[in-house]
Amino acid sequence: MARQVRRAFKYRFYPTVEQAAELSRTFGCVRLVYNKALEERTRAWCGEQRRISYVESSAALTHWKKTPELAFLAEVSCVPLQQALRHLQTAFSNFFAKRAAHPRFKSRKRSRASAEYTRSAFTWRDGHLTLAKMAEPLDVRWSRPLPEGAEPSTVTVSRDSANPRHERRDRARLARAQRELSRKAPGSANRDKARRRLARVHARIADRRRDFLHKLSTRLVRENQTVVIEDLTVGNLLKNRTLARAISDAAWRELRTMLEYKCAWYGRDLVVIDRWFPSSKLCGACGTVRAELPLDVREWTCGCGSLHDRDVNAARNILTAGLAVTACGDGVRPQRDTSRTGRSSAKQETQRATAGIPCL
Ligand SMILES: [Zn+2]
């Protein structure tokens, strides 16, 4: 007798531009439907002590889709919208049974954007997962395999941000602590206190940064067989001595150290590209190298007509160079297992590694 067991597995995927746009629309519609249904239920409960059922909410959704202002709700998959109403139903059941507080509105900023797809809203074929309203399967990193014979019954997609959340607030705290220190008279007890406060702010920023770099490096190493990075340190430090640049150079070195030992632990290849490689100035499409490209130019068009995002183009060039190194095994790193070295899988991550770090 076969017993069915439901388990949840969490994987990361990287949407294409079209998929990201579709998901973003869907997240927005899910939030709107949830909030609108919550508003109606709250009005009925507070005004008339009347409970609205899931069936009534679902009928209301059908009605909203027919109005000119909310017709756009019909453009996304209807399943995540229905699931949002089911979740609201569960939240109200818990509220009425006194197991939970009254449901709260979903906020664009504070709530986690998510959408739930049940079996009718995705296809699962040969290990490829395709969501409703999408032409291509999702580029999922199967960081651990699904159990033998397992079939997904529900797919929940949620969005997280790859950058540290506290960065702006930390910077404001740092500026304030520095201002306070500069106002205190030299040699005074208050100045000493202000100095200690400033040191604490610095320590907390360093802790957060290290925590973020640990998460980032673990993910890069777990999800990819080969990680290619650019050796950025000395050259850039000499060119530009501003504090912000120095901090991000320190972060870069820290990330690189973590990648080195984690790649060794997990048996991955780390390829370091020479810092004199013209990663930014090289057109990835035609191979032309520009004479110069000032640091403030974020986008440029090559003579061949290709429009480049500075960081994305550089990341692609670094990846291509790194994979060429592993393919001909010219001594930088021994090659391990080419069958698992997916070009596209490393590409995304190289983009993050080079594009994501300078903003730390
Ligand atoms: Zn070109």
Image (cartoon, rainbow, N blue to C red):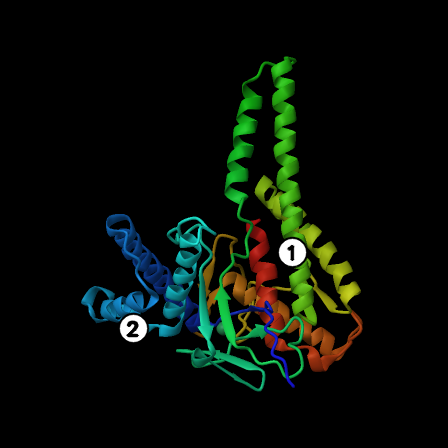
Q: Residue at x 64, y 14 (%)?
A: 189
Q: Residue at x 50, y 74 (%)?
A: 154
Mark 2 neighbour density, 10 Å: few (under 14) some (14–19) many (20 or more): some
Considering the numbered disc 2 on the image, is that residue within a helix, a strand or a loop? helix
Mark nearer the N terminus (2 vs 1): 2
Mark 1 = which residue? 215
Contact, mark 2 vs mark 1 (Cβ under 8 Å): no
Report if residue 303 is visible in the image.
no
Q: Is residue 216 above or below residue 1?
A: above
Residue where numbered disc 2 is placed: 74
48 on left or right of 3 = left
Q: In the depicted view, which residue is nearer to us: 164 or 349?
A: 164
Amino acid type at mark 2: Ala
Quadrant location of the N terminus in the rendered image: bottom right
Residue 354: quadrant of the picture: bottom right
CA gap, disc 2 and disc 1? 38 Å
